[in-house]
Amino acid sequence: MNDGAQSRAAAVRAICAVLAKGKRIESAIADFISHDLSGPDRAYAQALTFGVLRFGHRLQLTLMPLLARPWDSQASELKALLLIGVYQLEYAETPPHAAVNATVEAARLVGQGRAAGLINACLRRFQRERTELLRQADFSVAGRYSHPEWLSVAISRDWPELCETILASNNEHPPLTLRANTRRITTEDLADRLEGRGMRVRMSTFAPRALILEEPTDIRLLPEFQEGLCSVQDAVAQLAPLYLGAAPGMRVLDACAAPGGKTGHILEECSDLKEMVALDIDAARVDLIRSNLARLGLSATLQVGDALDPTILAGKRFERILLDAPCSGTGVIRRHPDIKWLRRPADIAQLVVRERKLLDQMWGLLEPGGRLVYSTCSVLRPENSNLVSQFLADRSDAVDITKSISLEFQGLNALSQVADVGISIFPGISGTDGFYYACLERRTLSI
Ligand SMILES: C[S@@+](CC[C@H](N)C(=O)[O-])C[C@H]1O[C@@H](n2cnc3c(N)ncnc32)[C@H](O)[C@@H]1O
């Protein structure tokens, strides 16, 4: 059995875990792309998994006309094998005959030996009829940019002029961006150390601690990471402490904190806080906050708990609250292409209800005169500006101050000109993930 078939079989198992079992891509890869594979085969299996999840909606449209039975009635392994096959033919550099042969051989490894003839026939027909099959698939915007129809419609409804840019960039490979731990090293010195290791890095034009790596690398092996000199964080996520504006002596709450990316950054920027509380509902993820802060040489009061529980943090008040809400993740699809497959249209309304409840609950913990930063990694207005607008309409003591906070947005083409509350940042425009921030100040109301 050749290794090419082994790596494709591993990718089939990982893809099925996402598409049929609803697993997230990281755990599917951890579970099924085994360490028995050689390094290059493992990397190839991962690339196939990411590639199929990125381009699978488009590719399945090209496969449907080739099958006698409806796509949805086919076995998951067969669908994954066909997607892997056409993905290689359309997007990978594998020679076509090797792609077809290894995929057919992989069918036997995943219990689809009887379908080997069908897979062979479909892939060869795809090669012959490729132009016409793709023309038909590309007829709709969703097909052309390989998204589920509902998501393409939702993005187009919210951002008609930017929709195709956002969808196209959701299929790109994201850069690896680091955040220098300013308590231990400057961004410039970190850049020098990494360049000394032969790495090519570039500064962000708007996030002062961000360094963008030009080539992918296994960051966990870097001494600079192990020594706590840096963290992995997209440049746009590094704006949170700048918007929060925590100052010495303040009590700060990070309400949905795990794995602690933004907690660490807030602490790096401001050393003399009265207290930094990092709360998260998920105990295992709170352990990640603990280990991340330990690596960075930082500490906070960690708490496992539901931010919606009114007894949580009862009696406490904070001058600054970050609510980095659990959201649809539609701004980070390029990093997590499984989101296209795992999110359902009905999820959005449910997420909005929870996001609003979290905002109401956290507002009750904010000192008068204090500031709450509401953020999501979503590009959908219902989770962002619509929700915050409604909140402002309902609360006479809340005011949006986002645009009055002057940040150096050089190079960050944030759509602050949009007549909207908060600030929306889009993948494909700024080179960053998609993100939303609203800075809300709690007025002291005179009676
Ligand atoms: C977007 S992630 C936060 C990322 C984090 N701020 C960072 O920068 O590393 C959202 C987090 O909210 C947590 N969460 C979801 N519902 C929650 C709730 N009701 N109370 C507290 N945390 C919650 C999830 O466990 C998840 O860790």
Image (cartoon, rainbow, N blue to C red):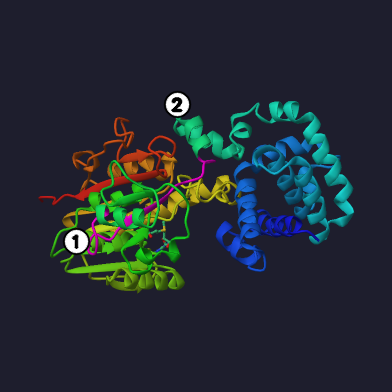
Q: Which of the 4 image quarters holds residue 85?
A: top right
Please state which of residues 232 and 406 is positioned toward the viewer in this rendering.
232
**Residue, disc 2:** 161
On screen, residue 325 above or below 170: below
Q: Whole-percent x and y of residue 441?
A: 20, 49
Q: Answer whether residue 177 is magenta in the image.
A: yes
**Residue 304 in sight from this viewpoint:** no
Q: Earlier in the sequence, mark 1 or mark 2?
A: 2
**Ligand 1: does it lie within 8 Å of the C-beta at label 1?**
no
**Residue, disc 1:** 270
Residue at 64% from the left image edge and 53% from the top image edge? 44
The quadrant of the rendered image in which ligand 1 is seen is bottom left
Region rendered in magenta: 170-187
Left or right of 278 on screen, residue 219: right
Left or right of 178 on screen, residue 220: right
- Neighbourhood count class around disc 1 (C-alpha, 10 Å): few under 14, some 14–19, many 20 upward: some
* For the residues bearing labels 1 and 2, Cβ distance under 8 angstroms: no
Q: Whole-percent x and y of residue 298?
A: 27, 70
Residue 53, labelled with which disc?
none
Please state which of residues 156 and 106 is positioned toward the viewer in this rendering.
106
Q: Quadrant of the N terminus?
A: bottom right
On screen, residue 328 above or below 3: above
Callout 1, which amino acid?
Cys
Element at label 1: loop
Please state which of residues 212 and 401 is positioned toward the viewer in this rendering.
212
Left or right of 360 on screen, residue 182: left
